[in-house]
Image (cartoon, helix red, strand yellow):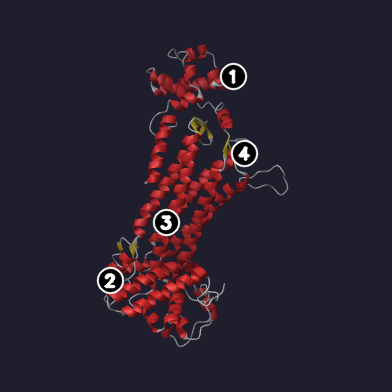
Amino acid sequence: MSTHGTITNDNHAALWHGRFKEGPDAAAVEFETSINDDMRMAFADIQGSIAHAKMLSKQKLISKTEETKIIQGLNSIKKDLVDGKDSKGKPFTVDMSAEDIHSFIEATLTDRIGEPGKKIHTGRSRNDQIALDERLFLKEQIVQLKKELVGLVKVLVSIAQKNKETIMPGFTHMQHAQPVTLAHHVCAWAWMFCRDIDRLTDAFKRVDLSPIGAGALATSGLPLDREYEAKLLGFSGVTPNSLDTVSDRDYYLEVASDLSMLQMHLSRACEEIVLWSTVEFGFVDLSEKWSTGSSIMPQKKNPDFAELIRGKTGRVYGDMVALFTMMKGLPLSYDRDMQEDKSSFFSAYDTVIGSVRIFTQMVKTARWNKKAMAQACDGGYLNATDVADYLVRKGLPFRTAHGVSAGLVRLAIEKNCRLEELDFAEYKKASPLFQKDIFELITPQKCVEIRKTTGGPSSLAVEKQIEQLNAFIKK
């Protein structure tokens, strides 16, 4: 990557170099730099510096003229970063030899506007500056991820709306349990992602506090106005304790935990898609755009993208654990260990938002095999609970009814037939409460439609869920 140009003065020396006679060894500089990670926060750093200049001017710590020059200089850096070239048409990007993004921007600003650029760091430390950059950038990331998740929920709701009567087996322990519908199942996925959205929304409230003005750890002896600067930056308030502020990375830890849970939800859904796409299940046919083939077996159509999402879950968990491990033994306030936060968090975030986007397109373009799902309901005695419920409605205690139904299942297994294929006489022998309408009430469709309880799989209950999900999306 190209840099911003040749340095002809000491503006680009490390911000802390004044204490030292010698500069650091080249290997030491390479080891300590964070520019590879924090360069993506360049615009957040510029945004924070513009607000800081306005606050300094308001507090008479710099002149109005200096404020104007600083803001113009910062905006020119932002424009050149966006354009990839400076006003003279020369290539311009972040200087990868800089110690960090703050050093690069401050040094470049001073190159452009001279002495006023050296005043931008008045009343702040890199400790509260990096916390500000991280919070500003994280707020944007949370908003973007929530948008992607809302898009995913919309796709799932659309699938559910079209499949309220698509009967399929429900499973516990990966054994046939009770009949449900595809709509009911994808709504289950949707509710998982809604909880993920809620968790991110809740985390946003704790991210949305401005740390700037906390300084290195003990604020500043200068008359700063933290509340004014926070308002300029769109924060809901300021952090209450400066020592805690610069040593806090809870916002990364909390969101990383949320990301891990979200990736786990994606992984579980992908595991089902992998199973459902097998010949043995045949419930779903993934689009060729979201499948791959084999280098040796011509017939293969592999659910690689679902498998990759499932596989990347370990990476997200690892990034989360790395963050928690980094923080577990650090004394207050700031320690350089905390510089490692960005690589782990960005890795987790990039993996998750990429997985959400792929999963959304994968399920959106999938074809659902209604016939295979319906046929799968023929085996496994999914209607055994409904046989017991039939007797309960006749007044028999459930535990007794459970035993009667279990006996009928054993009989059907011995005869190698379904429950609905047993003779009525065998039902009558099992319990005199049975009437011939039992056969009408234990079809997969009836077993589903009778479950009108809130949250159930009947078309009526699922329609209510769809209404709730649509309301959630609008909110």
Q: What label sits on residue 278 in the rendered view?
A: 4
SS class, disc 3: helix
Is 470 located above or below residue 383 in the figure? below
Q: Residue at x 42, y 46 (%)?
A: 194
Circle 2 or circle 1, nearest the eye: 2
Q: What label sits on residue 172 in the rendered view?
A: none
Under mark 2, the amino acid is Asp
In contact (CB < 8 Å): disc 2 and disc 3: no
Q: What label sits on residue 225 in the rendered view?
A: 2
Q: Nearer the viewer, residue 135 or 344?
A: 135
Q: Position of residue 401 (x, y in %)?
A: 43, 21
* Dot placed on the residue nearer the N-terminal end, 4 or 1: 4
User: How far apart, in angstroms, are the residues tagged by discs 1 and 3?
Assistant: 58 Å
SS class, disc 2: loop
Q: Residue at x 35, y 65 (%)?
A: 233
User: According to the image, label 1 marks what residue?
Assistant: 415
Residue 13 shows up from this direction: no
Q: Which residue in the rendered view is the most extreme toward the bottom?
A: 21
Crowd band around label 2 with a 10 angstrom C-alpha radius: few (<14), some (14–19), many (20+): some
Under mark 1, the amino acid is Lys
Q: Quadrant of residue 91?
A: bottom right
Crowd band around label 3 with a 10 angstrom C-alpha radius: few (<14), some (14–19), many (20+): some
SS class, disc 4: loop
Q: Position of residue 322 (x, y in %)?
A: 47, 61
* Dot placed on the residue nearer the N-terminal end, 2 or 3: 3
Under mark 4, the amino acid is Thr
User: According to the image, label 3 marks what residue?
Assistant: 142
Under mark 3, the amino acid is Ile
User: How far apart, in angstroms, are the residues tagged by discs 2 and 3?
Assistant: 27 Å
Residue 230 lies left or right of residue 192; in this view the side is left
